[in-house]
Image (spheres, helix red, strand yellow):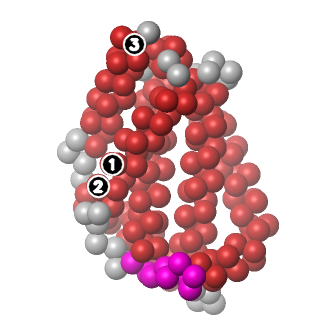
Amino acid sequence: MEQTKQKVNKWIEQTFYQMVNGIDIAHFEQHIQQAIHMKRAQSTTSNYLDDVMMNLTYYEQNNAQWYALFEQMLANQVPFTTDFMEAELLMAQMQIRQQMTEQRAALLQLFTEAYTTQNLTENIILYDYAYAMIAHGLRIDFLTMATKHPQKELLTTVNAEETLRIIDGYVNYHADQIARQLTLV
């Protein structure tokens, strides 16, 4: 079992290395800046930071869905396939968007309070946004690669919670490393 665990951990490490090795930081920066500029342009009646915070909330809820789905896959409770994963995540994203639309007023009130109580500045919010966007992409890419890996069954033979903790560690580390290199304002 320990050998299998080490093999899985090594595979996770190598997969993340492949995903971020030679990454084009300028591409990430341009993509994220375009999203920020679009939010600024579209926010004529509201604070564009509210829209950025809505996206942060969306990414947080997507992360929870990703985590739950991957945990079920690792525990062999649902099919460990790309098609199943894509369908489930798409359905979850549509539900999250609907819920956020319904909860927009309450969320905006929470954001307004957070701006003052947590001293959230534009730079902090934009870093968090970039980080969340990058982390979301890494999670989805990793899950896609995992579902296509010829030895994906190995992932189901080790502790799912520990495996997810390791994956999350790599996601957090790489998302932070990439986001810190970006100029967003």
As displayed, is residue 69 above or below residue 42? above
User: Mark 3, residues whose alpha carbon is within 10 Å: few (<14), some, or many (≥20)?
Assistant: few
Q: Which of the marked residues, 2 or 3, is nearer the chain's N terminus? A: 3
> In this figure, which residue is indicated by the disc labeled 1?
174
* 3D distance between C-alphas at marks 1 and 3: 26 Å
Give, as a single range, the part of the protein colored magenta: 115-123
Residue at image coords 64%, 82%? 113
Marks 2 and 1 in Cβ contact (< 8 Å): yes
- The amino acid type, in three-letter code, at marker 3 is Glu
Amino acid type of disc 2?
Gln
Residue extending furthest toward the left: 22
Q: Please name the residue shown 36% across and 11% down the image.
A: 3
Residue at point 29% right, 63% down?
Answer: 180
Residue occupied by mark 2: 177
| Residue at the image position 50 percent from the left and 18 percent from the top | 158
Q: CA distance from mark 2 to mark 1?
A: 5 Å
The amino acid sitting under disc 1 is His
- Observer-side mark, 1 or 3, equals 3
The answer to whether mark 2 and mark 3 are in CB contact below 8 A is no
Using the rendered view, name the quadrant where residue 11 is placed.
Answer: top left
Q: Position of residue 169 (x, y in %)?
A: 40, 42
- Check disc 2: other Cα within 10 Å, few if <14, some if 14-19, many if 20+: few
Q: Taking the image as drawn, is residue 49 in sight?
A: no
Q: Earlier in the sequence, mark 1 or mark 3?
A: 3
- Numbered label attached to residue 2: 3
Task: For residue 157, say whether it is visible.
Answer: yes
